[in-house]
Amino acid sequence: MRVRPRTRRTTAVTAALLAVGLLATACSGGAQTAGNASGNGSGTAVLDIGMPNGPQANNSNPFLDTSAGASLGYRSMIYEPLAMPNVIQPEQEPAPWLASEHEWSDNFHTLELTVVDGPEWSDGEEFGPEDVAFTFELIRDTPAFNGYSIPFEDITVDGDTVTVTFGASQFTNRNRILETLIVPEHIWSELDSPETFDNREPVGTGPYVIKSFTPQTITLARRDSYWKGLPEVEELRYTSYNDNNAQTTALANGETEWSFVFMPDHERIYLDRDPEHHHLWFPTGLGVHGLWLNTERAPFDDPAVRRAVSLVIDRQAIHEQAHAGLYPALENPTGLPLPAGEPFLAPEFRGVVVEPDVEAARAELAESEYELDGDTLRGPDGEPVSVTLTDPAGWSDYLTALSIIEDNLKEIGISAKVETQTVDAWRNAVDTGDFDATLHWANTGPTPYDMYQHMMDPAVYRPIGEASPGGNFGRFRNDDVDRALREYAESPDEEVRTEALYDLQRIIVEEAPVIPTVAGPIGAQYNTRNWVGWPDESDPYAPPQPTQRNVLD
């Protein structure tokens, strides 16, 4: 599979933006407010970005998701990938970047990259294919950098071509590999412990370098030259606010122009403050939030109960009330968010919309010898059916959703109570299987594989009491899941992979080990007073969130 440069279908504004590799371009005219373009009094064109992530340690190691560069997203303004996938349009081929072409072998065991000529490291050193090969070797040899356990084997350079071989099919990891941020060999090869390197003066091929760093504010300055042409934004100013409230206030006042923060009353607090310039867009990729059920603990060890719960949950109410309409609603019974999941749907689920159906839920239970005794559901043993719903205290969106689910379950006679825990206690309970049901997110990725693997992979199954940090927190075991996951990840035959994915969807619907409730958004709030060209529903050329790996696009 050889991939060459392609033409994006964009508006005239964003086409001009992409020509200089920039997310936004300067508005002509318009007010210049404090904290925004020219807000520093020097005439410098500044874009203010904020996140509610608290004080940051001075660490810009691009391979550590705990670093300031990852937390605020600026690592991807300094370092660049080989190609840029678009996670909100997963079927779209990744756009070429530091690699002008890439080709996978039929079995996805080998990747051949044609490295571009022209980039220069920000310290003036020449960039080349040796840097690409070195970066993959660094990840291979540093377990802390290889979070997905990618089985790198041989890595060779021949002219402008880098060839990487793997010990297994990388079909499900192919976009992760292409979006690897490339680092300079002449700096990183000198390190004894790269996993502890705080990288306070990062050197990349991207258009920006760090100008100043404090725990609250990090400023990036535009380089004198950049291989794709200089962007209009001269400085990127990242502010890390202490919490959601502080970040929301900064957005509403125009101090922050770009962010991703949960706003429970976003219309009144943000949009209505400046309807002309304040915008938000929360598209979805292939990730979800859902109710994880402990399939080794009654009553959820019975698939009939799990199916009945899935039938009665009001997902629209969860979308509107718990997540303020910001997290996209889920309509399909497979849990696949639409439209991102549309290309992957099994034929029998296309166009199917799931809605609460109390009568169908009661019929499901009656067929399995459950009896509704007044307002109480009694199991085959005659005992009342009751469950505990848990999540951390303070997670208001999840707790509101659990309250909705508690009311939904009453309609089929299940007595439910909501209990809260500390975050640490909850994480431990989820990992060890010490829960009845809990709301939790599922992994996202370039295909639905990541979501389904996280939910129900038998390979990461652990008995109750043993930690299972790799997922399958509900301890679900099904040989067909194991087969389908392996076939999808390893088969070179596209028809086999497609049918395996359809099987996983059928298992989610029929067995309901996890009940998807709402889509996981990749959203952002943004201000058009000084900068325009942002991605939106009419032009989804990139995810809008400022911490995404392809944020430079």
Image (cartoon, rainbow, N blue to C red):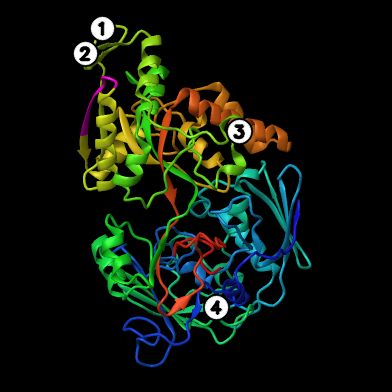
In space, the residues marked 3 and 4 are separated at their CA atoms by 43 Å
Location of residue 190 (image quadrant): bottom right
Q: Earlier in the sequence, mark 2 or mark 3?
A: 3
Q: Is residue 85 left or right of residue 491?
A: left
The segment highlighted magenta reads: 412-418
Q: Residue 317 or 336: which is nearer the viewer?
A: 317
Q: Is residue 199 above or below residue 511?
A: below
Q: Is residue 362 above or below residue 262?
A: above
Q: In the rendered image, which residue does mark 2 sit on?
A: 374
In space, the residues marked 2 and 3 are separated at their CA atoms by 39 Å
Q: In the rendered image, which residue does mark 1 sit on?
A: 382
What residue is at 55 percent from the left and 27 percent from the top? 506
Q: Is residue 249 above or below residue 154?
A: below
Residue 534 screen position, x and y as percent? 49, 69
**Quarter of the image containing the C terminus?**
bottom right
Number of other residues with Cα within 10 Å of mark 1, as a class: few under 14, some 14 to 19, many 20 or more: few
Judged by depth in the image, the label closer to the viewer, 1 or 2, is: 2
Judged by depth in the image, the label closer to the viewer, 1 or 4, is: 1
Residue 123 screen position, x and y as percent? 56, 81
The residue type indicated by label 3 comes to: Ala
Location of residue 12 (image quadrant): bottom right
Asked whether disc 3 touches disc 4, contact meaning CB atoms under 8 Å apart, the reply is no
- Which labelled disc corresponds to residue 346? 3
Q: Is mark 1 on a helix, strand or loop?
A: loop
Q: Residue 180 or 354: which is nearer the viewer?
A: 354
Whether 247 is among the magenta residues is no
Q: In the rendered image, which residue does mark 4 sit on?
A: 207
Judged by depth in the image, the label closer to the viewer, 2 or 3, is: 2
